[in-house]
Amino acid sequence: MDRRKFLSFSAMTALVVPAGLSAIDFRATKPATWTAKKVEDSIKALYGDVKLVESDVKVKVPKVASSGGAVPVTIKSGIDAKSVAIFQDMNPESTVCVFTLNENSVIDYSMKIKLKATDTNGGNGTVTAVVEGKDGKFYVGKQSLNVAQGGCEG
Amino acid sequence: MAKIKIKAKLKGDVITAKVMIPHAMLTYDQAKSKGVEANFITHITGMVGDKVVYELSTSQFLSKNPTLKFKFKNAKKGEELTINTVDLSGAKQTAKKKIK
């Protein structure tokens, strides 16, 4: 229940963001994305019931990550896109982040994320990237990996 | 709080930028075990002048002191890249650096 309060709070916070920023703050416009636990539910909350095409989306992660607290992830794609969303199936909620793109964007993003190795997933998981193309199609790329120790415990 | 670190370099017509944002990025789980409120960056933008070149909404799952690397185009050497962040508590951070 507390989580919902935090999310509506962040929706209000988003309105404080200066008017100079162009596009979309997905936390404000699609709050359900951030609470969805399964990757399919997050994709549905963000983009709707869309068909995913596996093409031209490269997700790079180390096959074995030594620390779950900082796993390097790189997303690359040549698709003319509106947004890119990154999900994973190891943490309590599956959405990691959503990029908004425009004519200045080049899809080549790297970041370090937390992945939780639990007894249930045995440290195995998949990072999924969905690219919302300007042609209205949705492209997907995934990569599986193994994490040596838990990340969310900090 | 320490400052955001930015590096931006132009090669050909693409700029590669590296950004390090100091932030504890506490997940709900971590915050509970420490007995504090969860707090993490929720939105980040990179701008050159009034053009947005990088924008993302993020979750509790970016690592502590997130390092982000990204590319963009349509900007020149000497122009300034400004990074703005907002976190769950509403606190903002900003920094800027000239593209080399």
Image: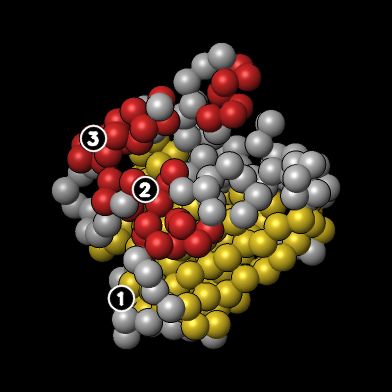
Chain letter for the residue marked with disc 3 in the picture = A
| Residue position for label 1 | A103
| Residue position for label 2 | A32
Image x and y of residue A82, in percent: 33, 72
- Which residue does the image show at 55% across and 82% down from the upper left? A54
| Above/below status of A73 relative to A20 | below
- Please tell me whether mark 2 sits on a helix, a strand or a loop: helix
Label 1 close to label 3 by CB (< 8 Å): no
Kind of residue indicated by mark 3: Met
Chain letter for the residue marked with disc 1 in the picture = A
Left or right: A118 as drawn, with respect to A12: right
- Which residue does the image show at 41% across and 25% down from the upper left? A2
Kind of residue indicated by mark 2: Ala
Q: CA distance from mark 1 to mark 3?
A: 28 Å
Say which quarter of the image contains residue A149.
top right
Both labels 1 and 3 in a single chain: yes
Kind of residue indicated by mark 1: Glu
Q: Nearer the viewer, residue A7 or B95?
A: A7
* Nearest to N terminus: mark 1 or mark 3: 3
Crowding around mark 2 (Cα neighbors within 10 Å: few <14, some 14 to 19, many 20+) is some
Left or right: A17 as drawn, with respect to A132: left
| Residue position for label 3 | A12
Q: CA distance from mark 1 to mark 2?
A: 28 Å
Say which quarter of the image contains residue A45.
bottom left
Q: Is residue B14 visible?
A: no
Crowding around mark 1 (Cα neighbors within 10 Å: few <14, some 14 to 19, many 20+) is some
Q: Is residue A102 visible?
A: yes
Say which quarter of the image contains residue A16.
top left
